[in-house]
Image (cartoon, rainbow, N blue to C red):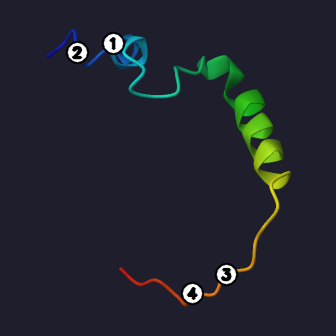
Amino acid sequence: YEHQGHPYYSSARLWDDGVIDPAQTREILALALCASLNAPIEPTTFGLFRM
């Protein structure tokens, strides 16, 4: 399990979107937030979801 628990193991199999270098976390997070703000927000017709 130790080998399969390594982050590169899952990334090599494309099970996730990749590994972010901790030194670049703020830059990657800022880019992701800017990209999400460019998407239009469509009105919804459904109510509140409760779990």
- Reading the image, the residue beneath label 3 is 44
Disc count in the image?
4
Sequence order check: which comes first, mark 3 or mark 1?
1
Q: Give the Cα distance between marks 1 and 4.
A: 40 Å
| Marks 3 and 4 in Cβ contact (< 8 Å) | yes
Mark nearer the viewer, 2 or 4 = 4
Q: Residues within 10 Å of mark 2 (few under 14, many from 20)?
A: few
| Marks 3 and 2 in Cβ contact (< 8 Å) | no
Q: Residues within 10 Å of mark 4 (few under 14, many from 20)?
A: few
Which residue is rendered at x = 71% and y = 37% of the image?
29
Report x, y in % for residue 10: 35, 19
- Reading the image, the residue beneath label 1 is 9
Q: Is residue 27 rendered to the left or right of residue 20?
A: right
The secondary structure type at the circle numbered 4 is loop
| Marks 1 and 2 in Cβ contact (< 8 Å) | yes
Which residue is rendered at x = 13% and y = 16% of the image?
1
Sequence order check: which comes first, mark 1 or mark 2?
2
- Reading the image, the residue beneath label 4 is 46
Name the residue type under label 1.
Answer: Tyr
Picture quadrant of residue 41: bottom right
